[in-house]
Structure formats: structure tokens, C-alpha cells
Amino acid sequence: MRLVRDAVLSRRGLLISGAAMIGGIAAGCSGGNGHSAKAAPTTSAAPTTTRPPQAVQIDSSPIGSASGLTQVDPNTVAAKYAARQPGQWGMDLDGIVTSFPSKGMQFALTFDACGGPDNDEINDELIDYLTAHQIPATLFLNKRWIDADPDRVVRLAGNPLFEIGNHGTRHCPLSVSGHAAYGIPGTASPQQAVDEVWGNHERIIQLLGKPPRFFRTGTAHYDEVAVSIVQDLGERPVGFSVNADAGATYTASQVVTAMADVQPGGISIAHMHRPRSGTAGGMESVLPKMRAAGYEFVHLP
């Protein structure tokens, strides 16, 4: 089913038109109550790609453990890219996982918790629903959200339904040249990009005893140099194929409409830090319908 243009913004449309679309698609974390939308400003520091989404083959083998931390030297990674200039900018570059090879009708749900002012709550209704109905999901947690209540993170990680992903340290677009998205300045150098990933990487290891496998940057925007930096730091950069709640600004009915665009092997992005949003209600309505249609919910491979 196609999205209704006036009600739901497709991920591809956001890449193409930028400022004309609702802001906060993956940001959803710039403060406030999460119910108002902000226009995304245009920027010109690097071209935006408009290639169709590509499934990225993901190696299912473990990428490390807490004891493997010394295998990556973040300073060496930063130095490696010190002279590299980016030429691409967007949410769908080569190397970003936006879908996965599906075994049948599989679909991956992901939820971001962005942290910072007015963004440190948890949508208990959403988490309780996923738990009650045994629906797995990847939870991308920002360091600010983690630090607001570390015990809450330990409880989430102790639930086998949930895998904890890295949502950055300061919640910045991941850039080596300061490229911005939705008015949020990106990291401005390879060292800053490394720090944005590594600061929360280490925090998650400290708290949970193992590193995250996946990283999603704040706003879901990357340049291609930043994508390589994430990979060199031992994580896999993740995007999405379905924008389920536009930064927790959608009503429940808009979430349902957005999720009508799902395809096998797809990855949805929504948010779990705004309990007064329509995200929980929308998911409670659409996920049973997806299951009835034959979908199986899975972790990212």
C-alpha cells in the first residue's frame, strides 16, 4: 500500500525534498513535547544521494565482546580519515543498513530513545505491549537517555526481546565537516565523529558488559566518511526503510498509515522516549494486523 502524501512522509521523499517535508523524522529529539513538527532546513555542504534503498548483507557472526575492546583504537580510526573529504550526505548511503535479506515475511522494528531536555522519559505503554505480545525490537539508546536512568537500561537489556543499539553520545548527525540535518549541527571532524560513536559505545560496555552491534546516528544522517568510521569502530550503521512516527510527532492513525508501507526485510524507525505521542497506540493497532498477514518480527540480523 502506498503512503498518503499529505499525511505520511516517505523516507525517500525526505531524502529528495528536505525542507519541504516535516522535520524531525529521525531527530524527534530536539526538545519540546514531541507533538509539533519543525521544517528541516536545506544545506549545501555536500550532495544528497537519491539512489533507491539497497539491502545490505549482514554478517551474523559476533563482532566482539567487552574483552575485545582493545582491538579498536579510536584515535587511530580518527587519524585514518583526517584528510578525507566527504562527497555524499543522506540517510541511504552505501554501507548503511536500511533493509536485510528476509527469510520469508520478516520485519525488524527499531525504536530510538534520544535523551536530552524533555526527552528522557520512556513510553512504558509501548514497551509493555511489545513485552506482553513477545515482539522483539532493537532499541537505539542515546548516552544522555542512558545516563538519565542507567537501571532502566539494565532492565531493558535483561529482556531477551530487546537488543540495545548505540544512538550516539550527543545525538548529532554524523559528519566529518559539520553538515547539519533539521537544524542540528553535525560532528565537524573525524575525531568528533569517532567521539560521537565511541563515547556511547564505551558507556554501553560499561553498563552491560558487551558492545553494541549497531549504531544509528542522531537524525539518521551520515556522510560516507562517517559511515566508514562507524564500521571501523566495529559497529554497523543502521538507517530504516519505514518512517513509522516522524520523530514521535505522528498520531496513532498516522503511525498505522505509515506502517502500511512495510515490505519483507524492512526496518522501521520509531521513538520510545515520548509517552504522550501516538507511537504506542499506532503500534498496538498495526502490529497485530501485520502478524495476521503473516509477518514475523525479528531482531536485526
Image: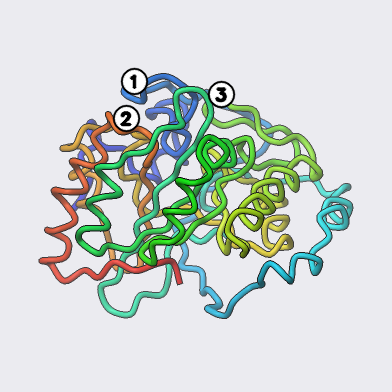
Q: Residues within 10 Å of mark 2 (few under 14, many from 20)?
A: many
Q: Secondary structure at mark 3?
A: loop
Is 257 above or below relative to 105?
above
Instruction: Identify the amino acid type marked 2.
Output: Thr
Q: Quadrant of residue 278?
A: top left
Q: Residues within 10 Å of mark 1 (few under 14, many from 20)?
A: some
Q: Which residue bears the numbered disc 1?
A: 36
Q: Secondary structure at mark 1?
A: loop
Q: Quadrant of residue 125?
A: top left
Is 90 above or below relative to 204?
above
Residue 119 as seen in the image, left or right of residue 75: left
Q: Which residue bears the numbered disc 3?
A: 183
Mark identifier at residue 249: 2
Residues at marks 3 and 1, CA–CA distance in whole angstroms: 15 Å
Q: Earlier in the sequence, mark 1 or mark 2?
A: 1
| Residue at point 62%, 30% (across, down) | 180
Instruction: Identify the amino acid type marked 3.
Output: Gly
Is 247 above or below relative to 59?
above
Q: Position of residue 249 (x, y in %)?
A: 32, 30
Residue 104 as seen in the image, left or right of residue 19: left
Residues at marks 3 and 2, CA–CA distance in whole angstroms: 17 Å
| Residue at point 52%, 78% (across, down) | 60
Q: Secondary structure at mark 2?
A: loop
Mark 1 touching mark 2, by CB under 8 A? Answer: yes
Q: Position of residue 103 (x, y in %)?
A: 33, 80
Instruction: Identify the amino acid type marked 1.
Output: Ser
